Amino acid sequence: MVWKTNEVELQNRGDGLVNANAGLFGGYPAASGYVLHVHGTNMEELIRTSAPYPTGDGDPESSQVRSAVKGEVYFTPKGFATSRPFEVGDLYLNYLRGGPGYGDPLERDPNLIEQDVNGDVVSPRFAESVYGAALRKQGAKWIVDVEQTGRKRQQMREHRKARGIPARQWIVQQRERLLGDQVRGVVRRTYRECMQLSPSWAKEFREFWSLPEDFAFSAGGKNDAD
């Protein structure tokens, strides 16, 4: 929160829209970022009346900031915002994405998941959808049902098998996307510029995907838009 001055300009620079940090050994990537500012807030009134106010945002789909504070909200999932003026009471959220996962989340110890949820490290909905935990509330505490979690995880593994494809088949599909000019936006421009800046990298890229020696990502057109 900006305090004691109206002469402040702030900007955001971070990852947004894409997962910049890949997981290891089955772990999921880190969350993508977003920008959240609130201008012309009622923070001074909340503080003066000892009313609840946000100290973070936690789950962006159940935002503490949006639910507790009135004001003009600026939000973008791009993770980047140019410099703009802030005044006393305005809120600036610098959302830190954290690191990627290590290991299959379905193998995490249920007791540790229980600690994570009760310690506000993982939200209950992600404990259920990502880690396969079966949760129930006991008073103010979340409890993980170990037996039910085992059954739920087995169902999730079966679902993985049903929708999964062999790696060789996936590579063929992705190669067809490259040849069919189906790579879009920032990803497309990034690959094109990398190939232009580094001939050795371009050569390795073409060889890995079995592409023609003259393959390149063309510039312009609807597929090159951000």
Image: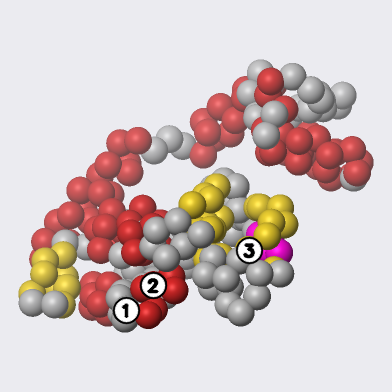
Choose top left, top right, bottom left or bottom right for residue 191. top right
Q: Residue at x 11, y 61 (%)?
A: 148
Is residue 195 rendered to the left or right of residue 27?
right
Q: Amino acid at mark 3?
A: Phe
The answer to the question of whether label 1 and label 3 lie on touching residues, with beta carbons closer than 8 A, is: no
Q: Amino acid at mark 1?
A: Thr
Highlighted range, magenta: 9-13
Whole-angstrom CA distance, mark 1 to mark 3, is 23 Å
The answer to the question of whether label 1 and label 2 lie on touching residues, with beta carbons closer than 8 A, is: yes
Q: Which residue is mark 3?
A: 86
**Could you tell me residue 78's position as x and y percent?**
60, 47
Q: Which residue is mark 1?
A: 49
Relative height, residue 133 to residue 152 (above, below) = below
**Mark nearer the N terminus (3 vs 2):** 2
The answer to the question of whether label 3 and label 2 lie on touching residues, with beta carbons closer than 8 A, is: no
Mark 3 lies on a secondary structure that is strand
**Is 216 colored magenta in this rendering?**
no
**Mark nearer the N terminus (1 vs 3):** 1
Whole-angstrom CA distance, mark 3 to mark 2, is 18 Å
**Main SS of residues in magenta:** strand
Relative height, residue 15 to residue 88 (above, below) = above
Looking at this view, name the residue that lies furthest to the left. Answer: 138
**Could you tell me residue 8's position as x and y percent?**
69, 68
Whole-angstrom CA distance, mark 1 to mark 2, is 6 Å
Mark 2 lies on a secondary structure that is helix
Q: Which residue is mark 2?
A: 45
